[in-house]
Image (spheres, rainbow, N blue to C red):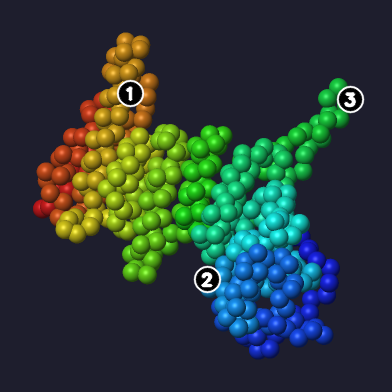
Amino acid sequence: MKFMKLGSKPDTFQADGKCIRYVISDLATDVTIIVGEVKFHLHKFPLMSKSNRLQKLVLKASEENSNEIDMVDFPGGPKAFEICAKFCYGMTVTLNAYNVVAARCAAEYLEMTEDVDRGNLIFKIEVFINSSILRSWKDSIIVLQTTKSLLPWSENLKIVGRCIDSIASKTSVDPANVTWSYTYNRKLSAPEIIVKGGMKYQEKIESVPKDWWVEDICELEIFLYKRVMTAVKSKGRMDGAIIGEALKTYAVRWLPDSVDALISDVHSWRNKLLVETIVCLLPSDKGVSCSCSFLLKLLKVAILVGVDDSAREDLMNRISLKLDEASVKDLLIPARSPQTTIYDVGMVHSIVNQCMINEKCSQDLDLGKNDVGCTDFVLGHGSLLSVGKVIDGYLEEIARDPNLSLASFIDLARSIPEFARPVHDGLYKAIDMYLKVGF
């Protein structure tokens, strides 16, 4: 972690209980600064020599025959003020990723600018942020996390935006040059020595995966995570599959496993927001970015937490494009009231219909380009055969439900075209199961 030390004098701040802070000095203190619940007994001159705001407040207090100044809504609270006060006294203070944002916001509040004194605190902190913090992957993430409690100051000072841009830019660094990921703990493979023509060559291997950054940003809360991922996508240098993997990792990290936890009153709003955010961040390339299994799991969660219609329809459209990768288990989406069936057959039917529309559009496009017949198209593209097989398996599973209507069963069975079902064994099994349960 990067750090910067300021000042050289010994730290003579002392505490008297939890609410009193004072400076040990031969000179009596002549001003009391109140920050939150803490009273700081200090000296006017050091403070006024660095802070334009304190100059004005001390003058106003003197006119009112008072030696107390109450700092209302002070950013960063007593700890941040103490850093600024120690800087005014020339005492040693250490800035790091955990306290630099609070110190920067506090310095802004106190107007510790170059107009007051050359080399003032704002200038020194900005140098530290730009030359050290934003060049460090780990520190940029830590600093970004600390900005949340310091809004709107951190936003107005563009610290949030600068951190996001720094993080997003670093995600596209060549993995071969990455040595600073702090959650990456896989052992690096040793390069092999290859002998060619009597000469030894050290084979260069990619020891760090392309998705090295994915776990590192999972600690960000959803609003900041969304902004970072939006910035990553906007730069246009990240493969859609890696973005999809990042979203999957974030979902696994934050979405609870149990249904009760998903729909609990305490976290239902957060879970709904999380799912809707992940859906809106999915890459525009719907064909390759995420596995069908992940999309179907996300759809099940989306239904449980009650996401809006547009997010649910987006997921269904994406699933329809990859339906040939689905398994029967993935498609078993629990039905919700007022449905009486065990599984939401209507939703799967809608996905299948959309899949058929997608295939028809692709077929028409190929026919226009190559004048290839329908049969040749299907033989050249086995995806519909896979869809037919999985839907027949799904039919056999839902046929066990005594509440499944005959019309629903038949409609779904007929949604698969004949050429996608060259063998009818799966359909026969499903029909046999339906008749057994029904009679």
Sequence-wise, which precedes: disc 1 or disc 2? Answer: 2
Q: Position of residue 152 (x, y in %)?
A: 51, 59
Give yes or no for contact between labels 2 and 3 (Cβ–Cβ under 8 Å).
no
Alpha carbon separation for disc pair 1 and 2: 60 Å
Q: Residue at x 39, y 53 (%)?
A: 275
Pick whichever, 334 or 143, lies toward us. 143
Work out which residue is located at the far bottom of the displayed protein and give it.
Answer: 17
**Residue 335 occupies which quadrant of the picture?**
bottom left
Q: Residue at x 68, y 58 (%)?
A: 113
Q: Secondary structure at mark 1?
A: helix
Q: Position of residue 74 (x, y in %)?
A: 56, 70
Q: Secondary structure at mark 2?
A: loop
Q: Secondary structure at mark 3?
A: loop
* Marker disc for residue 362: 1
Left or right relative to 355: residue 25: right
Alpha carbon separation for disc pair 2 and 3: 73 Å
Sequence-wise, which precedes: disc 3 or disc 1? Answer: 3
Judged by depth in the image, the label closer to the viewer, 3 or 1, is 1
Left or right relative to 368: residue 414: left
**Residue 103 occupies which quadrant of the picture?**
bottom right
Judged by depth in the image, the label closer to the viewer, 2 or 3, is 2
